[in-house]
Amino acid sequence: MPIPQSVVNTNESAPRFLQSQNVARTMSSVDLRDLVNDARTRAGESKVRNDQFIIRVEDELSGELGVCSFIAHPQSGVMMASYELTLDQCTLVGMRESKAVRRTVLQKIKDLEGPKKLSTIEILQIAMESEKARLMLAAQVEQQATKIHSLENLFKEGMTHTQFCKGLNGVNVMQVGKYLETRSWLYNESKSGTRHRVGSYARDKYMTEHQHEVTPHGKDPFISFTPILLCKGAVRLYELYLAGHLPMKKNWDGLHTHDKAVRGAA
């Protein structure tokens, strides 16, 4: 049989799907036959000659095939009759094999197919989700920056928890000490309930203590301890404030300090 002028030569050893823009993936029947024969060998079945395989292809895909051409086998270089088959056509031909062979062939076809080509709608959906995530992140970053700015203005080294909470809109400062007792930040060492000490849970983590000697007139001197808020403690206290856990005044307007700052700047 004479060889057509449009013979396709290839030096590639592995079967592959070809795809041009807007054109369905294709695979030569020679490459498909090699996949089938490899699976048949593994299943203990005899190989199929190319002329036999071409007959199967023509029988299965009668009326759907293009022009039969000749290509060089990627390994032996022998010229063989071949059809270009789409993925669906390869699957139909592969379904003619035994169960064991069919399962292997179809899986290899699926693996060779490569990544799924996204539709325009899917691409738009991904773009919309990406933009939504970007806007949410930008809002979170802006909100976080506002909180940090508020903290920088509110917290000064050496502050007590009371002094810090005075800068938080709506907080009932008189009740904060008792609240911190419930969180084991503070404990009370006096019967009157007015002398707070830093608890072991919060010591050197959220709070520390300043001490100084007090000398009352006509009485023995004693050491007084003042709980001092550390920077990490101020951050945690601010988080509790924003989460709605601090004791608030009954006439609180519902705005947090950074809310008021943002509205005031608008």
Image (cartoon, rainbow, N blue to C red):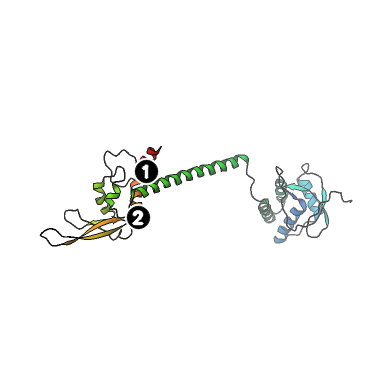
Which structural element holds mark 2? helix
Quadrant position of the C terminus in the picture: top left
Which structural element holds mark 1? helix
Residue at 69 percent across and 56 percent down: it is: 101
Mark 2 and mark 1: Cα distance apart in space: 18 Å
Mark with earlier residue (2, 1): 2
Q: Nearer the viewer, residue 100 or 145?
A: 145
The residue at the far left in this view is 218
Q: Amino acid at mark 1?
A: His
Q: Amino acid at mark 2?
A: Cys
What residue is shown with label 1?
A: 258
Q: Is residue 2 left or right of residue 218?
A: right
- Asked whether residue 161 is in view, the answer is yes
The residue at the far right in this view is 2
What residue is shown with label 2?
A: 231
Residue at 75 percent across and 54 percent down: it is: 31
Q: Nearer the viewer, residue 126 or 212?
A: 212
Residue at 60 percent across and 39 percent down: it is: 121
Horizontal and vertical percent position of residue 7:
83, 51
Horizontal and vertical percent position of residue 81:
82, 51
Place residue 202 in its image quadrant: bottom left
Horizontal and vertical percent position of residue 70:
83, 51
Residue at 23 percent across and 59 percent down: it is: 225
